Image (cartoon, grey):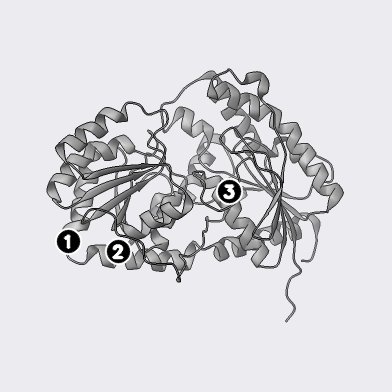
Amino acid sequence: MSHPAPMRILLLTPLWSPDGASPSGIANHFHCLARGLRDAGHAVTVRWLPDLHHFPAPDHTANGVAVFRHEVSTRLFARSGWLARRLAWQIAALPVAVFAVFRQLAEQRCDIIETTSFSALGWWVEKLPGTPPCFTRISTTLDQLATRHTGAYSRALLLTAAMENACIRQARGPLTHTRRHRDEIEVMLGLDPRRVALVPHGIDPARPDAAPAPRLAGAPALLFVGNLGHRKGADILLEAAPAFLAALPGAALHLAGSTEGNDSLTAVFASLRNAFPGRLTVHGRVDAETLENLYRGCDAVLVPSRYESFGMPLVEAMRHARPIVATTAGGIPEVVGPDAGVLVPPGDAPALASAIIALCTEPGQLARRGGAALRRFESLFTTRSLAAASAELYRARLRFEEGVVV
């Protein structure tokens, strides 16, 4: 039986993680996708246009994948607010993305391009003559952030959201990671549901040879990972905390993620620490090794988000066999499934507290749901699964659009 020939794949992204441990789910997606496709025998190149959040880094090789960096300058807007700089970056990035694709095609032909709707890099790329078929992955959009799930509003945000929406509408190969997210995007933008492909995210399994991680303080130790902002539901978690900490006398809450732009949390932290001394730890933004140890050292992971198109902390918890308490928002139910965790309505602090208490007090629940979480991860959300599903989608597109037998 003959095996399909390897493909030459270009990943075009504003967000990239050399080690797969970025705070950005988009960055980690492209890291895992690149390595998974390479491990499957495909030739993968990454063209990276670092956005405002990401550190400068030269061209490099990550896990055998060549990564080329393309500078996008916003120096003229250095004194502007973040959203104005974001809009300036997004506009300036469009011609740079075109140059990056031309450079790739001049140096090494490619069969497929995958990019992200975030930053709308595919807007002009798909219009270029001779461009290979392009897939545009749709994560939580700026329009959703501006008008539906955070209450944030500004002219700059709405303009950047409009650019992303235009990119999604014109995309020849839109794809996303959960049905619920696909349904919301279809309603927002009027897309034909048959046009939007589904490929769930995938990440690496936990290392079997890793040294045992020290247990976190608390019995149980409860972990939240993510930006401590509105969409992630940090305020709801902190509102629920007095109830579950009082009901679970040995419990401790651990928060891992940036508090930037959330100065109001300082008073909340102080209040909780006064009421429950030694039972709240704010780790801040952590590196990859520390994050792994936090997952391995906790008993359960809390994801109280108001919206997630997918929710990377969910699968990060599942690969470590950690049960989850999360919400029914967005794509979360599809990721967690019926047995890996307990789900409550978003924005409901009493329901969140009750679910945490029940998970931690009912005999055998932590172990049973943790085992189910690991089994679900291994069957659906590995890097190998992501690469295999992506390659199958790419080949189908090539056969349909170009008549190429691959």
Q: Which is more N-terminal, label 1 or label 3?
A: 3
Using the rendered view, name the quadrant where residue 190 is placed: top right
The residue positioned 43% from the left and 31% from the top of the image is: 148
- Are the two marked residues, 1 and 2, in contact with CB atoms closer than 8 angstroms? no
Position above or below: 134 against 263: below
Position above or below: 159 against 5: above
Dot 1 corresponds to which residue?
Answer: 362
Q: Where is residue 207 in the image (x, y as percent from the top left)?
A: 47, 67
Q: Position of residue 44 (x, y in %)?
A: 71, 57
Dot 2 corresponds to which residue?
Answer: 369
Real-space Cα distance between discs 3 and 1? Answer: 39 Å
Q: Which is more N-terminal, label 3 or label 2?
A: 3
Q: Residue 59 versus residue 390: which sits nearer the camera?
A: 59
Examine the rendering and report whether any part of residue 257 can be seen.
yes
- Are the two marked residues, 2 and 3, in contact with CB atoms closer than 8 angstroms? no
Dot 3 corresponds to which residue?
Answer: 17
Badge 3 crowding class, 10 Å Cα cut-off, few under 14, some 14 to 19, many 20 or more, is: some
Task: Give the residue at the far bottom of this rendering.
Answer: 1
In the image, what residue type sits under mark 2?
A: Arg
Position above or below: 251 against 382: above
- Are the two marked residues, 3 and 1, in contact with CB atoms closer than 8 angstroms? no
Q: Where is residue 158 in the image (x, y as percent from the top left)?
A: 54, 24
Q: What element carries label 2?
A: helix
Q: Where is residue 329 in the image (x, y as percent from the top left)?
A: 38, 44
